[in-house]
């Protein structure tokens, strides 16, 4: 059984090497390989950027919680007494001009 698995894996390895060799000899393979490498670089760059978004998202949620707790707390202005409105002017003679 082990020999049979070994033979199968050996055949698969030979076939894959042969397929890679055919692809390398095909016209346009250089451009395809360069495009795949560029795609890999772009994916790596996107992964780095999304890691930054995760950090910002956690900071934003912490700030939102803090804002919610501060907005629910009673403020001093609402508990402060207000002064009575000013008295209306008394009727009488108009003030003298200098």
Image (spheres, rainbow, N blue to C red):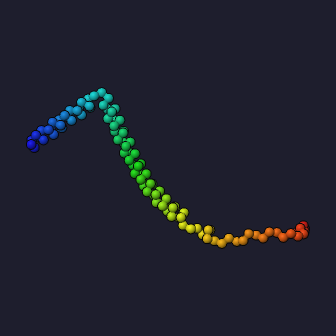
Q: Nearer the viewer, residue 68 or 41?
A: 68
Question: Which residue is drawn at the image coordinates 41% and 53% (left, top)?
Answer: 54
Q: Nearer the viewer, residue 58 or 37?
A: 58
Q: Is residue 15 left or right of residue 28?
A: left
Question: Which residue is drawn at the image coordinates 61% and 71% (left, top)?
Answer: 79
Q: Nearer the viewer, residue 75 or 52?
A: 75
Q: Position of residue 98 (x, y in %)?
A: 90, 68
Q: Position of residue 64 (x, y in %)?
A: 49, 59
Q: Position of residue 2 (x, y in %)?
A: 10, 43
Q: Residue furthest top?
A: 27
Q: Is residue 92 above or below residue 36?
A: below
Q: How many marks?
A: 0
Question: Which residue is drawn at the image coordinates 51% and 64% (left, top)?
Answer: 69
Q: Quadrant of the N terminus?
A: top left
Q: Is residue 43 above or below residue 81?
A: above
Q: Is residue 82 left or right of residue 46?
A: right
Question: Which residue is drawn at the image coordinates 43% and 57% (left, top)?
Answer: 58
Q: Is residue 78 left or right of residue 6?
A: right
Q: Quadrant of residue 31?
A: top left
Q: Is residue 42 left or right of residue 73?
A: left
Q: Nearer the viewer, residue 91 or 18?
A: 91
């Amino acid at each position: 059984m082990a020999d049979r698995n070994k033979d199968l894996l050996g055949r698969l390895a030979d076939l894959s090497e042969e397929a890679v060799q055919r692809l390398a000899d095909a016209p346009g393979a250089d451009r395809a390989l360069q495009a795949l490498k560029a795609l890999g670089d772009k994916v790596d760059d996107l992964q780095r950027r999304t890691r930054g978004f995760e950090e910002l998202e956690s900071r934003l949620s912490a700030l939102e919680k803090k804002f919610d707790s501060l907005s629910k707390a009673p403020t001093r202005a609402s508990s402060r007494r207000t002064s009575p409105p000013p008295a209306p002017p008394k009727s009488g003679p108009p003030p003298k001009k200098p």
